[in-house]
Image: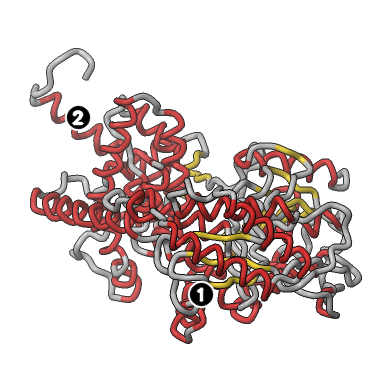
Amino acid sequence: MSEKLYAWLLRLYPAHFREAYGDEALQLFRDRARDEKGFFLRLRLWLDLLFDLTISLPSEYLHVHSPRAVTSGPRRLFGVPVLYVLQDAPPRPGALLSGGVLSAIVLTTCWVSLSYSRTPSRSLFPQTENREGSATSSRMNSDSSESRDTASPNRSAAQDNRIDPSERKRVLNSAIANLKAHYVDHDAAQRIADALSAHEKHGDYSAIADRRAFAAILTQQMWDVTSDRHLSLDYFQDPLPQQPISQTPQALAVYRENMKQQNCTFEKVQLLQRNIGYLKLDSFPDPEVCHVPAMAAMTYVNHADALIFDLRDNRGGEPEMVQFLGAYLFDHPEYWYNPRENTTERSWTRSPVPGSNLADVPVFVLTSRATFSGAEQFCYDLKMLKRATLVGETTGGTSHSGIFRRIDDHFGMGIPEVKAINPYSSSDWAGLGVEPDVKVSAASALDVALKLARTKLPKK
Amino acid sequence: MPKQKLSPLPSAAFQILLALVGEDLHGYGIMRQVAEQTGGRVRLGPGTLYSSIRTLLEEGLIEELDSREDARPGEERRRYYRLTSAGCRLARSEAQRLAEVLRVARAKKILRGRYV
């Protein structure tokens, strides 16, 4: 929590500082937080940080113009000192006061934003999935609606979530009608409908007064009849739009701009010691927008002797990008399982990718409990094809492969409308997650993967 | 011209230069070393530390190392810094300047106690 808060505070710094030293500043905070435990030390740490923020923030914004003035202008003998932040004298009281007021305003704004909104990058991906029209997030959206609940203390969640018998009846009937009309397996749809109706007759729902509980129980009851974990009934506290917001041109423009700002979520592309390629990717963005950065990233690590994909913070995205990156790792087309689509000629990877040297290097994928959806597809397919060693935690277990059907303002369903061929004997990750090959905590996954990678490198 | 831009040398910058004498350190290492050499009086926060580091880098007084050969696994991402010969010269001249100030202060007998 405190690290998140400091990461938020870091956003107050200008972009040039964050790009150059954002990671280091956060690392320094982590180091101090690790070493300085206990109430007083922690209090001192935060006082230090707030003082540092007050002093260095104004200087950082001033610094933007300073180097230009120095480099482009003539030599200044009696110029204003460039290094405000390093000045020997203590800051003027006026500067301290204005810095303090500014910090207070910014901190308050931060708290308010944290309480009432989600970050743009997080909200992006479920929308992206809607945009494709092929699916929507089931678990991810219900998670985020939960997080919104907890973040809104003023709102009486219990009040909002109450469900009355007539609403229960209406939602249940809609769910059954949707199942019968759209679920790919008609026999199973009928069996589920019968089971739900039977539960209703027995009065199993009469005691349920909470909307979220109602959605969870219905989902479980559907799963009792069929093993299909792609089927779900979801509750959303905030009213659902009539049509997915992300289908509008404005939303696409925002997405494009966001991807540009975030380098298409390629967080880190590095060559580590012993020529081990390291690629930290926090989503699988739309290839139409992001194919150039994606190709650049893969080209950068093209001559690595081993490759690590860090998907610990990856919440999923577009299946096309999942397959696009997967294609680099094979020297012939491989069947790439995608639970959202029927099998077509596009179900095979476009391998070999011209110029790729990565078809036979050892590959490691780092996972965490927060690895979701498209990222899980990447893990699952590479694991089934025995092409990568998964290191970390069991993934989140969200597949978002059902097409989203809106029932009303607060309820929706994920209903699979295609039967994708899964050539592997084990079922996919929906509801279960992908088990790693090497089970370690997400925090130590990189260290473990590096050690494993070194053992697989040619001896020097 | 480092001397002009960093004249007088700010104390945070001087402390960082001193911290790096004889040892390459990463950001947190520098912060701890500075705290140690000032008896805990100066704890550089991330904002002050990294803006000072940037200026020292721009002035060629310190340099960033590509990567450390003896880095432990997981440490590859940390950036290490090393004092350059220009940085060493500047730190020395600053120390001489302070010594001169100290000499005057002693002569004027404004200091008490046996340690100075």
Crowd around label 1: few <14 · some 14–19 · many ≥20 (10 Å): some
- Are tags 2 and 1 found on a single chain? no
* Residue topped by disc 2: B102
Specify the quadrant that holds the C terminus of chain A: top right
Is any part of residue A271 visible from this angle? no
Q: Disc 1 on helix, strand or loop?
A: helix
Position above or below: A298 against A430? below
Tell me which chain the residue with mark 1 is part of.
Answer: A
> SS for tag 2?
helix
Q: Which part of the image, by quadrant, shows the N terminus of chain A?
A: top left
- The answer to which of A446 and A113 lies nearer the viewer is A113
Nearer-the-camera pick, A137 or A290: A137
Which residue appears at 23% of the width and 16% of the height? B115
- Residue A428 in the image: x percent, y percent? 77, 56
Residue A81 lies left or right of residue A142; in this view the side is left
Q: Residue at x 72, y 63 (%)?
A: A301
Q: Amino acid at mark 2?
A: Leu
- As drawn, which residue projects farthest toward the front? A201
What residue occupies the far top of the structure in this picture?
B114
**Count of numbered tags:** 2
Q: Assess whether mark 1 and mark 2 are in contact (beta carbons under 8 angstroms).
A: no
Name the residue beneath numbered marker 1: A260
The picture places residue A332, in percent across and down from the top left corner, at 91, 71
- Which percent across, then down, holds residue B44? 33, 40
Q: Is residue A115 visible?
A: yes
- Please tell me whether residue A369 is drawn above or below residue A65 in the rendered image: above
Chain where mark 2 sits: B
The three-letter code of the residue at mark 1 reads Lys
Residue sticking out furthest to the bottom: A249
Q: Is residue A186 left or right of residue A87?
A: right
